[in-house]
Image (cartoon, coloured by chain):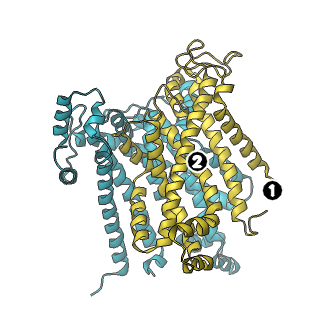
Chain colours: A yellow, B cyan
Amino acid sequence: MSRIPLSALIGLILTAAYFLAAIFASVIAPYGMAEVAGGVWEPMSSAHWLGTDSIGRDLLSRMIYGGQVTIFVATAATIVAFVTGALLGFVAAVSGGWVDQVLSRLVDLFMSIPALILALVILSVMPVTLPVLIAVMGLIESTRVFRLARAVAVDIAVMDYVEAARLRGEGLVWVIFREILPNALSPLVAEAGLRFIFMVLFISTLSFLGLGVQPPLADWGGIVKENKDGIVYGVPAALLPAVAIATLAISVNLVADWILNRTTSLKGGRG
Amino acid sequence: MSIHPVARLLAQRIALGLILLFAASILIFAGTQILPGDVAQSILGQSATPQSLANLRAELGLDQPAATRYLAWLTGALHGDLGTALTNGQDIATAMSQRLGNTLFLAGTAAVISVPLALILGLVSVRYRGRWPDKLISAVTLSTVSVPEFLLGYLAMFFLAVQHRIFPSVSTVYDSMGVLEKLHAIGLPVLVLVLVVLGHMMRMTRAAILNVMQSPYVETAELKGLRPFTIIARHALPNAIAPVVNVVMLNMAYLVVGVVVVEVVFVYPGMGQYLVDHVAKRDVPVVQACGLVFAAVYIGLNMLADLVAILANPRLRHPR
């Protein structure tokens, strides 16, 4: 931990700020999420720092609560994606043979359809609730994690110490959790950052299309959708959540880049 | 007797693409049919009467086994019959053909602008590597790829349609419009799509050309005293074609998906808008048909990328 480059530091501070705002949303938001506190599309003022939305709710409070929903869904979906993707990837790499073939070809199939299209097809018959959204997004995205986890684990599975563990008579579970996982962790952590951003963009896009988080809950994509009609009257309310999404994406990217650089550097990555 | 090895490789890749498309059709069908719960129930909601549920089940053919329904759907789709929409009873293939044309017009225009632009910008940043043109291009493209499509869409709409009125904010097109009128109408969505794919395409083009320019045979050519133009045209270009074409194709495939969001932003009457509308209405036959068409285009473009790569790279002709 000698020196953190400036770009990574900015990324860390912004990311931490977004997460803290999400966790303490009910403490810092000046108004309630669904509270009508003023006129329609009021401009920025001291009472409403970011103005009001299409039916007069305080936009800053909506943004803070919306961030909570967005970050919660994206985090949960990232966890689902990593638990299933990494576990199946490790199993495929360690078992080899037909298990590997079946899993890999299935993942090829899922990746042959664009993620957004597949999500829309599945959501057309599923009830759109938060658990369903998290599961659908997580499982679709787990195919990408599977590819990475398998590629990393294939290299580790041929190491001498894995061979030694197998000769000792250790089972599949031991090999995966005690031999492979600790050595595959750092590329997976960096990947988690990138996947998290992708999830934020994914849930925002779905909500913007009206097929994600449903009212009365709102996330950033949903706030864009509610206020998009204001654009033609010159009201920039719909641009604010989009700016929040973009800054969160860029700052997490900066942090992930830094982790990736540290862990993959030729000097052993201990800086 | 011998089939040319390249021809055999190409045939294998095409066969793989067809198998993948077939499997994708199963996945799309299964995704809407074998989910927990009943499709009719989730279309009509909790308050549906038993009679209307039974009617809808019969209309969807849910009384037959899933495999039979799948085969009937697939044979229909292969003959160009995609079924009828639940919501308005219209023939899906007819409703779709016009919209597919609109979408291809939008995506095609974006491709025609973005591909040459990306190649030129890639070449410029290789030529001025490490100096300000390279850094400027790199910074701008990094920020366009970090921003969601609909933000770019609304930013463009806010500044170019509302504040300066250069392009219309809503991209309505009719059959009776001339080509120039149509191009003016889709100015903003094309701009957004170009920005979305340009960054990615330009960065990968730059990396591919840099990779080739650093190889020993280019250095040899320089030491032989060849002119820079000859080096690029005769030595670097043939080896950079395969990765560059690959990048272009992958981005065209990405364009097909990006179009969905952009069409909704600008209310453009294309496939994406059609799909999103009918997902919200839970119109399963339309969603299946749209999913199939999108998957086919996506798989087709990926296949094309591989075919070009096989043709352009002799090393891929001899699989180990």
Q: Is residue A41 above or below residue B155?
A: above
Query: In the rendered structure, which disc, 2 or 1, sits on the residue that comes first in sequence?
Result: 1
| Horizontal and vertical percent position of residue B230 | 61, 72
Q: Label 2: which residue?
A: A196
Which residue does the image show at 57% across and 60% down from the upper left? B205
Q: Label 1: which residue?
A: A1
The answer to whether residue A51 shows anywhere in this view is yes
Real-space Cα separation, disc 2 to disc 1, in angstroms = 24 Å
The residue under label 2 is which amino acid type? Phe
The image quarter in which residue A234 lies: top right
The one nearer the camera, B37 or B30, is B37
Which residue does the image show at 53% across and 60% down from the upper left? A86
Residue furthest to the right? A2
Secondary element type, mark 2: helix
The image quarter in which residue A258 lies: bottom right
Instruction: Report the quarter where the N terminus of chain A lies.
Output: bottom right
Q: Is residue B297 above or below residue A10?
A: below
> Would residue A35 appear left or right of A119 to someone viewing this image?
right
Residue furthest to the top? A39
The one nearer the camera, B159 or A128, is A128
The one nearer the camera, B309 or B88, is B88
Chain to which the residue tagged by mark 1 belongs:
A
Chain to which the residue tagged by mark 2 belongs:
A
| Horizontal and vertical percent position of residue A76 | 54, 44
Total tally of numbered discs in the picture: 2
